[in-house]
Image (spheres, rainbow, N blue to C red):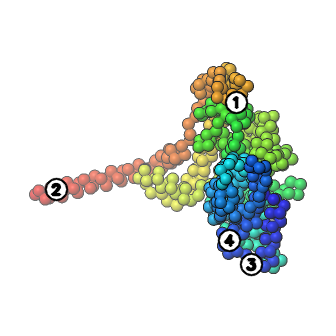
């Protein structure tokens, strides 16, 4: 992609819309115009040498076919729907980034003449992020004559509709915990524009004058392993194992990643989330290399930081879990009502408004105990780092890296043995509903006994009436 030219064309297009104030009413039309401006250069190597051609994204999405291109570019096909009819700009961005990454992988295919040709996209695969950021900012930036905001955007549907879990602030901005677009943890506030929020001021956090945003987008964890050799994948697996990936806890295959179960992918996503959030809290640590050309290179500073400061990093997240475990939000009225109605019905009594009010605080206290128990269970989970000292042997790779004959000479303890030696007992979950029932049995004993007595008398009366009616009929 000719970055400078395409950026200039898109900027001019957006400025032109501001000048004319004639914004597309249909989001699909807006996307179609962007596709006409994005240029993708493709390098083509044949027996005659290496050349190239630049195509607009709109042209490629029309699937011109081998008769016009000279080859069949089927790489584009899976992305046509999301790049021509996306629900919002985030969907469009994810598809565009994935397409650019796919095109950047060199492929040898048959040309229309029958000879083998090699094609490779030569554009900047990170350019999709520039487009996304520019359009998102432009869509809510006011013009000299019209005020625009998230509630009054220039083009509807650029941003997805608000999801549950958003909090409306007094100023009208939405703050969420956990981004829809980026890997972001549940405890760091972030607004709908993916800007981290300073908890003290309520304003976007800044570093060196720049607003801090998360870097790693959702979905990129899987891209870490795409197109890599077995050796390269195994090297990453070793890196992940050194900072906590438990390769003994699943069907680990050296040099291979299961994209369905995705244990390594899930671990990478967790690291990306930690790196994003730690960078927001302490941007001076430089835990993300934004200039690196690969995802692993971008994440590597955080991996190295975590290796050197493993105890401190774990302590930081452990402390965060403790703090937020104690800050359980009060249950909603519907949650309290559902729990109380169910348990009262089992005991044959009817709740009152005062009961709902009384059990709301009890319910909150039990939820805190549940969170505290979950924290202990999480802390007691076994990892490779916990049991590595109890294991005997190590990996060996014969033949200088032939992963097909890899030998594992590791004698691992059983989970029971490891837990016993490390003093980490297996603990069960805290059952809030059952514990609330026990509290009710104690506090409502009189009402329950009275209800049962009334029920017994009612049943006796019904039986007496039935017997009397039978006697009367017989008489």
Q: CA distance from mark 1 to mark 3?
A: 60 Å
In front here: 448 or 372?
372
User: CA gap, disc 3 to disc 4?
Assistant: 12 Å
Residue situated furthest left in the rendering: 475
> Of label 2 and label 4, which has the lower sequence position?
4
In-front residue for pair 208/247: 247
Kindly identify which numbered label has been placed on residue 37: none
Residue position for label 3? 22
In this rendering, position of residue 448 left or right of residue 470: right
Mark earlier in primary sequence (3, 4): 3
Nearer to us: label 1 or label 4: 4
Which mark sits nearer the N-terminus, 1 or 4? 4
Work out whether mark 1 precedes mark 3 in sequence or the reverse, and give the earlier one: 3
Q: State how far apart marks 2 and 4 are (Cα).
A: 81 Å
Callout in the foreground (1, 3): 3
The percent position of residue 228, horizontal first and vertical second, equals 70, 40
The residue wearing badge 4 is: 29
Label at residue 385: 1
Which badge, 2 or 3, is on the more N-terminal residue?
A: 3
Please tell me which residue is depicted at 74% across the width and 47% down the height of the picture.
47
Is residue 132 in sight in this rendering?
no
At 58% from the left and 50% from the top, the residue drawn is 362
User: Badge 2 is on which residue?
Assistant: 470
Q: Nearer the viewer, mark 3 or mark 4?
A: 4
Q: Residue at x 56, y 40 (%)?
A: 429
Q: CA distance from mark 1 to mark 2?
A: 77 Å
Q: Quadrant of the C terminus?
A: bottom left
Marks 2 and 4 close (CB-CB < 8 Å): no
């Amino acid at each position: 992609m000719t970055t400078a030219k395409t950026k200039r064309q898109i900027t001019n297009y957006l400025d032109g819309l501001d000048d004319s104030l004639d914004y597309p009413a249909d989001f699909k039309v807006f996307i179609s115009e962007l596709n006409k401006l994005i240029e993708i250069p493709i390098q083509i190597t044949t027996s005659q040498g290496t050349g190239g051609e630049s195509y607009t994204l709109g042209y490629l999405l029309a699937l011109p076919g081998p008769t016009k291109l000279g080859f069949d570019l089927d790489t584009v096909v899976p992305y046509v729907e999301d790049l021509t009819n996306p629900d919002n700009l985030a969907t469009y961005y994810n598809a565009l980034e994935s397409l650019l990454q796919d095109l950047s992988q060199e492929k040898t295919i048959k040309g229309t003449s029958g000879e083998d040709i090699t094609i490779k996209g030569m554009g900047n695969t990170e350019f999709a992020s520039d487009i996304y950021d520019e359009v998102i900012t432009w869509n809510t930036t006011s013009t000299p004559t019209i005020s625009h905001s998230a509630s009054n955007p220039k083009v509807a549907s650029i941003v997805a509709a608000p999801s549950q879990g958003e909090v409306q602030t007094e100023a009208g901005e939405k703050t969420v915990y956990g981004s829809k677009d980026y890997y972001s943890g549940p405890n760091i506030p972030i607004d709908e524009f993916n800007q981290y929020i300073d908890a003290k001021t309520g304003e976007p956090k800044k570093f060196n004058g720049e607003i801090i945003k998360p870097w790693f987008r959702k979905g990129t964890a899987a891209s870490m392993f795409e197109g890599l050799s077995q050796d390269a994948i195994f090297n990453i697996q070793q890196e992940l194992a050194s900072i906590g990936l438990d390769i003994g806890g699943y069907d680990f295959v050296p040099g291979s990643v299961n994209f369905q179960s995705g244990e390594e992918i899930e671990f990478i996503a967790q690291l990306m989330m930690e790196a994003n959030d730690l960078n927001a809290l302490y941007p001076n640590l430089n835990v993300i290399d934004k200039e690196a050309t690969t995802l692993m290179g971008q994440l590597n500073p955080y991996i190295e930081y975590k290796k050197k400061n493993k105890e401190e990093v774990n302590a930081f997240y452990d402390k965060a879990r403790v703090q937020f475990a104690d800050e359980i939000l009060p249950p909603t009225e519907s949650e309290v009502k559902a729990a109380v109605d169910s348990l009262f019905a089992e005991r044959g009594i009817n709740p009152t408004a005062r009961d709902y009010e009384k059990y709301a605080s009890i319910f909150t206290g039990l939820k805190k105990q549940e969170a505290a128990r979950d924290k202990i269970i999480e802390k007691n989970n076994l990892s490779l780092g916990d049991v590595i000292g109890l294991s005997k042997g190590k990996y060996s790779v014969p033949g200088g890296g032939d992963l097909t004959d890899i030998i594992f000479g590791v004698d691992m303890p059983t989970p029971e043995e490891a837990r016993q030696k490390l003093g980490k007992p297996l603990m069960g979950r805290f059952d809030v509903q059952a514990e609330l029932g026990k509290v009710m049995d104690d506090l409502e004993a009189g009402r329950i006994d009275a209800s049962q007595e009334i029920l017994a008398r009612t049943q006796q009366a019904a039986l007496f009436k039935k017997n009397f009616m039978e006697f009367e009929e017989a008489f």
